[in-house]
Amino acid sequence: MKIRILLVDDEKEFVETLAERLRTRGFHVTEAYSGDEALETLKEYNFDVTILDVQMPGMDGIEALRAIKKLKPLTEVLMLTGHGTIETAIEGMKIGAFDFLLKPCKMDLLLEKINGAYERKSDHEERIRKAMVDKLSTSPMSVFEK
Amino acid sequence: MEHHHTEADKSKKSGLLSNKMLWLIVGAACFVIIGFIIPTPQSLIELVEKQKIAEKLIEWHVAHDVAHAAWKAKLVLAMIPMAVIYFATEALPIGLVGILMPMFAYFFKLLPMKMIGQTFAGDAPLFLLGVLAMGVTVIGVGLHKRLATWILGWTKGFVVPIVVLCVSMSVLGSFISAHAMAAFMAPVMAAVYMGAVSANSNQGVIEHDPQLAKLLLFALCFALNVGGVGSPAAGGRNVIMMGFWSDYNVPMSFGRWMMYGLPLTPVLGLAVAGYMLFVFRKVKTKDLTPGLLAIKEETKKMGPMSYAEKVAFGMMLLILFLWIVGGHDLGLGGPALLALVIPVVFKIADWRKILGGISWDAWFMYCGALTLGALLKETGAALWLAQLFLNGLNAIGCGKGLGLWIGMSSFSGLMTNFMSDAGTTALLGPIAVPMGIMSGVQGEPWAIGLATAFATSFAHFLIVGTPNNAIVYGLGVYPDTGQRMISPIDFVKYGFILWVICLVIIWVLGFMVLYNVVGFPEGITETAKAVLMTNAH
């Protein structure tokens, strides 16, 4: 199954170019141009990895990260940062981001981080699935428990 | 896997069934009312006296006189509605309901002390222990995934993958834990679905085909359910029934069960495929080939067959071989215990991991069921219930042979949708077996036992009927939106007619054809009857 990526950055040209490059490598990419737009999209769809610019007008990267983690805790977030905002990216990792990348980033490194983030999400999902199956195997009625 | 829970889920969660304390009290109240308040039926008193059961219980020092012996039988009868309530509402874990049986037997002195523990240590409990241990190793090394991807990986198109899925899952479900298979295959089916619909969608926007999602998940789920008829290793319920036959000195061998059950599985699998393809004939996506790449990806990820998989596969074949040809000397427990030894000796599984992976909940439940069977048999409660039901069935002309098998399989099939399949067999088996014996038809009590056990594999129309249904429902989510692919009511909508179809198949192909073609050994009815009567005298 294709890895589903949400790419969030206010620089339209950067987003479009990167999205196209990722699509040609077999990823399923959705674009968003602000934190608010990203959250609206996330309300409707699940993504494996969100690539998030830390510096955006309006809702900044950290604020968006908190909201994303609250809305979809399993979605892994990669933070895109410039040299001047590394501290922000580190703060982001403390509150749940998978990793950060310096802009402009090399495609090989980006792919490595995306795959790493996807693997972590898959492992996490597998553990949840296993716990769920263990419970349902002994108590089918627990399927109705939240 | 971030799920959006529907309002239906929430309302059910806060519903009456989730109030476990209430049902705990209701179950206990039923036991107290039947056991201590309602007077003992005169017919029960007469039966324990006439059949000399009272004499036996007095000799065993578990009853003082006839009335006391009949009361003991009534106490055992009172345990049935309590167990039904606890199984159906899950007010207590199933293993704990099993533990209640010997516990009550000890506290109310329903059997001599040395007889109570025996049901926890016979061939059937050891067989089940081995079956559960084999499941832990086979699943642990991922052999079930390998087998599934081997079988499905080569398919293309639309109809062929569905037919292969249904037939292979029903046959595999006869030998490998259907729950584990459902847990592995449900996300694979979701991936097959996504691959198939993505190929038909424009870039970025996936146009969903909910009918296809339902087709794939229900085909998987129902095919795994029907696999339960194929062999005794399919589930504890079959082991329980074999335990009941052994109690009447007419044990059935593993191979013999397969002669009656295994030919039914591909037919039932085909019926599932045919019905699903008919019901969902209007799916928009008619080519699964792009989605089936997901299975090829899984196979690629696995790499070549590992040492652990090879040993597990060899172990499975060896145990199956010994079950089939080992005969009565080895029993079923003997070969089954190899499933505990081989993985540790060949270092493919850790001993503690095997111990941790065994479903002790299931094991305690099965052993408890055998205790209940012994209690019903020894106190005369089973005989009394069997007579009661037989009188009723005779009145409508279904008191023996085909009519009885159809009646019992319908009741068992209905009951299993509301509670655990093992619970259904545990409660109906001890009554069905003496009913069959008393009907006097050649082939009893095997024929009625098989009829009862086969139908417990058809828990198609309620989500709580079997863990397979709950697992497929729980894991069946659209990967992109997290919405559920099926709703609880879909089980009724698509499962009910299939339930009828499956019953008709076992009536026609099982009872009318296979029972006659395979036949039954001479004298089993007489042997079982002698035990029933000796037991009574």
Image (spheres, rainbow, N blue to C red):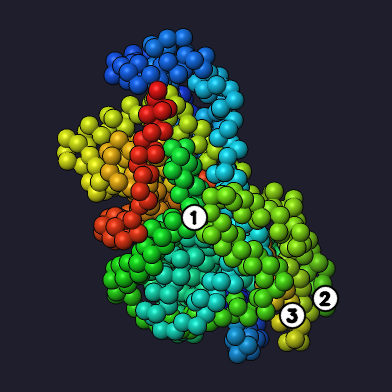
Query: Which residue is depicted at the point 59% across and 72% down?
Result: B146
Q: Is residue B64 shown left or right of residue B343?
A: left
The image shows residue A86 at horizontal and vertical percentages of 82, 72
- Do marks 1 and 2 share a chain? no
Q: Is residue A77 left or right of residue B271?
A: right
Q: Give whichever of discs 2 and 3 has the lower sequence position.
A: 2
Tell which of B446 and B38 is nearer to you. B446
Occupied quadrant, residue B163 = bottom left
Front disc: 3 or 1: 1
Which residue was labeled with disc 3? A112
Which residue is at 55% across, 35% downward?
B119
Q: Residue at x 35, y 48 (%)?
A: B522
In this picture, is B434 found above or below A91? above
- Residue that carries the numbered disc 1 in the rendered image: B254
Which chain contains the residue that carries disc 3? A
Circle 1 marks a residue in which chain? B
**Could you tell me the amino acid type at mark 2?**
Gly
